Image (tube, helix red, strand yellow):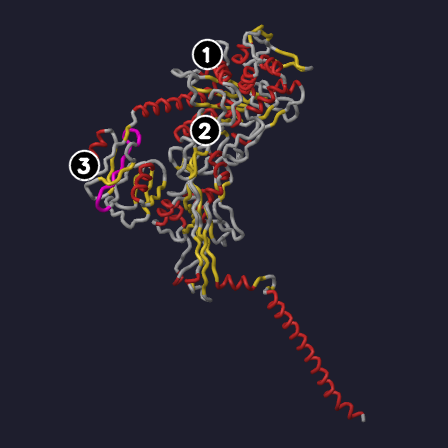
């Protein structure tokens, strides 16, 4: 019996093992079945969406980038435009080879360094050092900011050197051709990175670029297409394509001639006297157009040098106490409300308000003087007398009528509305000379415009138009004072300049009558009260010219000059006087040109020779489009009024041919496009020097012509 049990035991063990193996296989099968069921139901595995993965493999999307709109000044000069920029890099790894083990890395580092030093702002030694890093396992190297934002012409020049191992990355960027030029006003656009580190479309992050980002950006298009397992495009009929919609062009009110001059003046004063900040804005008194505007510190929009010093546009984003320039509003309010008697005398020097003493800038005063001299002498005591005569309610009403405590609405981001400290009688008194109230630069210009426009306030504007619609119409911001009040205040502003007791005699400009108000504002101390010291002020001047027919308002501020070797007035005059004079001279020239304007005659139906002679006899230039000898169209049209030496384009019968556009202005090229119906892609600013279609080339069938200006 014992031996029988022994023989049966292996058989029983095999049976048990078989059952156990079957159970294990069944369990594994159930796990896989459950897993497959889960995948089939959810379409996910390990957090990966299989449907999307499959679509990614067999479908592809590509973005068609929209071209960002160009920003122009009022004369049609380019201030900001899209270009492709290039960055250069060098591959050092010996693993990077081509067919037959041909080296695709840098093989001659000394030669490469020598050649690159001709095109990059780096010395041969620095480039060679970059090409020979201590870590020999480095795959590739770049050259910092010196190797970035390279133009197409520089890229091509480097490529012609045939340097092994030198390559380029292409990316969209924004060109600001004028460098330091209303930089905070125009702003900048940058390319943010996506999740993969690739550049996305440009986005405005400051100034006009930010405010009008939606209009400038346009809308990207896309292309959807299917592909096979090898990556080849298939079934092209089902491909979906949506064209990109390019951004709109923005035209500003800035005048490049005046803006460039302002930048030069500010740079000179800033370098010599080292103020902590400066602002300057020139505005057309009648229309509110900002013709020139800048600040210090600033930055070079082309190189971004200095951008870290200050990001804010201080012309709209900074609030500050304006000081005595606000006395323009105080005097206007007192006159307008019937609380001003110019013949009333008062004791100058100081006045008690509550338990505090308010002093004139000349603390001893000028004795008993009439109120008619208070403004020109910039007497704080005189202004307090006017505020007390009006009462706090009337004065506050005028503060609001003049547009303070709310944004002007100028087309720039981040405009501050300002604040008013107006609880105690002392607060109410100090606002009369610009203390205890915070304003921005544009609010001050808007307030002053009421004096220049017979009591009607004009809103400051920086936008001339979008696309081709760019003609500025004045926008009234209210009528805070009567005509007679405005004229009286303007006369008081003249007294500041031309009376022997005026504080602004330094602002006289030969051959022109000027009206100004000077200002010296205290600066709040973070620890309480106000800062002390000869230079711890915001010095300012606001002026109108010509005083007998106001055309311009110029406002200049300067904060805490660190090298105050001259008086504040004489420092500010180094900006104010030449800037205002330059603007007035442009006006004089424009008026002279207006007197010489020419009315364009109709030459349609005349022979080309006859038409050209008729127009040149009137002092006009001509250009012909076409091979015929009879004029069939003309631009400008008959009876248009233009200036001498402007170009009239004539279209003749016969085949349309391309004229030589060398020396043509942008406006001439736009007329050519309008006349022929051919799109002209204009790059650069200035005058034409290169055209993609040869002279006398046929225009029939041509869709686009590229013209470069410089």
**Left or right of residue 492: residue 424:** right
Tag 1's secondary structure? Answer: helix
* Label 3 vs label 1, nearer the camera: 3
Boundaries of the magenta span: 640-655
Tag 3's secondary structure? Answer: helix
Query: Label 2: how many residues lie within 10 Å, few (<14), some (14-19) or many (20+)?
Result: some
Location of the C terminus by quadrant is top left
Mark on residue 52?
A: none
Q: How far across and down, in percent of the image, does residue 115 sit?
A: 37, 46
For marks 1 and 2 on the same chain, the one whose residue lies earlier in the sequence: 2
Q: Which residue matches tag 1?
A: 498
**Left or right of residue 24: residue 619:** left
Q: How far across and down, in percent of the image, does residue 642 sit?
A: 30, 30
Q: Is residue 393 above or below residue 605?
A: above
Q: Which residue matches tag 3?
A: 609
For marks 2 and 3 on the same chain, the one whose residue lies earlier in the sequence: 2
Tag 2's secondary structure? Answer: loop
Mark on residue 474?
A: 2
Location of the N terminus by quadrant is bottom right
Disc 3 from disc 1: Cα separation: 59 Å
Is residue 651 a member of the stretch shown in magenta?
yes
């Amino acid at each position: 019996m014992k031996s029988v049990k022994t023989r049966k035991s292996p058989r029983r063990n095999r049976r048990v093992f078989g059952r156990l193996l079957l159970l294990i296989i069944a369990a594994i099968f159930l796990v896989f079945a459950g897993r497959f069921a889960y995948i089939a139901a959810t379409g996910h595995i390990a957090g990966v969406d299989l449907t999307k993965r499959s679509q990614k493999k067999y479908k592809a999307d590509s973005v068609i980038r929209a071209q960002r709109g160009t920003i122009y000044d009022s004369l049609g000069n380019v201030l900001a435009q899209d270009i492709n920029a290039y960055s250069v890099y060098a591959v050092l790894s010996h693993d990077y080879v081509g067919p037959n083990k041909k080296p695709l890395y840098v093989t001659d580092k000394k030669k490469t360094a020598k050649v690159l030093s001709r095109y990059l702002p780096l010395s041969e030694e620095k480039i060679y050092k970059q090409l020979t890093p201590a870590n020999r396992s480095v795959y590739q190297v770049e050259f910092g900011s010196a190797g970035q934002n390279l133009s197409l012409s520089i890229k091509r020049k480097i490529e012609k050197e045939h340097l092994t191992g030198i390559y380029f990355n292409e990316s969209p960027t924004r060109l600001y051709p004028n460098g330091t030029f209303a930089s905070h006003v125009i702003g900048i656009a940058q390319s943010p990175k996506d999740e993969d580190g690739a550049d996305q479309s440009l986005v405005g992050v400051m100034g006009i670029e930010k405010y009008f980002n939606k209009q400038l950006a346009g809308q990207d298009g896309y292309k959807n297409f299917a592909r096979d397992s090898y990556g080849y495009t298939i079934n092209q009929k089902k491909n979906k394509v949506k064209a990109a919609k390019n951004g709109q062009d923005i035209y500003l009110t800035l005048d490049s001639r005046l803006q460039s001059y302002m930048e030069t003046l500010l740079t000179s004063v800033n370098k010599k006297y080292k103020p902590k900040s400066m602002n300057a804005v020139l505005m057309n008194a009648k229309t509110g157009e900002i013709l020139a505007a800048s600040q210090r510190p600033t930055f070079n929009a082309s190189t971004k040098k200095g951008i870290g010093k200050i990001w804010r546009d201080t012309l709209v984003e900074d609030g500050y106490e304006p000081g005595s320039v606000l006395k323009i509003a105080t005097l206007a309010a007192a006159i307008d409300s019937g609380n001003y008697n110019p013949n009333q005398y008062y004791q100058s020097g100081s006045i008690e308000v509550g338990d505090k003493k308010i002093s004139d800038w000349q603390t001893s005063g000028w004795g008993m003087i009439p109120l008619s001299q208070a403004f020109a002498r910039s007497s704080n005591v005189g202004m307090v007398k006017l505020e007390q005569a009006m009462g706090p309610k009337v004065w506050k009403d005028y503060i609001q009528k003049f547009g303070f405590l709310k944004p002007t609405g100028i087309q720039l981001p981040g405009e501050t509305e300002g604040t008013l400290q107006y609880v105690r009688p002392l607060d109410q008194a100090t606002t009369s000379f610009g203390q205890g109230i915070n304003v921005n630069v544009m609010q001050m210009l808007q307030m002053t415009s009421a004096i220049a426009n017979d009591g009607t306030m004009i809103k400051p504007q920086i936008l001339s138009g979008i696309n081709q619609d760019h003609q500025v119409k004045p926008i009234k911001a209210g009528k805070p004072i009567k005509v007679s009040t405005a004229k009286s205040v303007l006369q008081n502003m003249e007294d500041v300049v031309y009376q022997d007791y005026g504080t602004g005699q330094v602002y006289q400009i030969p051959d022109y009558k000027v009206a100004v108000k000077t200002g010296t504002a205290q600066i709040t101390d973070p620890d309480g009260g106000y800062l002390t010291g000869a230079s711890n002020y915001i010095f300012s001047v606001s002026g109108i010219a010509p005083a007998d027919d106001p055309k311009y308002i110029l406002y200049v501020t300067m904060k805490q000059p660190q090298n105050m070797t001259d008086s504040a007035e004489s420092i500010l005059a180094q900006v104010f006087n030449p800037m205002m004079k330059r603007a007035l001279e442009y006006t004089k020239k424009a008026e002279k040109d207006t007197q010489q304007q020419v009315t364009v005659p109709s030459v349609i139906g005349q022979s080309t020779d006859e038409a050209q002679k008729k127009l040149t006899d009137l002092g006009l230039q001509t250009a012909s489009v076409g091979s015929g000898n009879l004029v069939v169209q003309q631009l400008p049209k008959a009876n248009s009024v233009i200036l001498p030496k402007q170009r009239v384009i004539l279209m003749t019968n016969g085949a349309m041919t391309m004229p030589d556009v060398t020396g043509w202005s942008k406006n001439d090229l736009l007329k050519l496009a309008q006349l022929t119906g051919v799109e002209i892609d204009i790059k650069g600013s200035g005058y034409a020097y290169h055209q993609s279609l040869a002279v006398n080339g046929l225009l029939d069938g041509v869709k686009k012509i590229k013209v470069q200006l410089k």
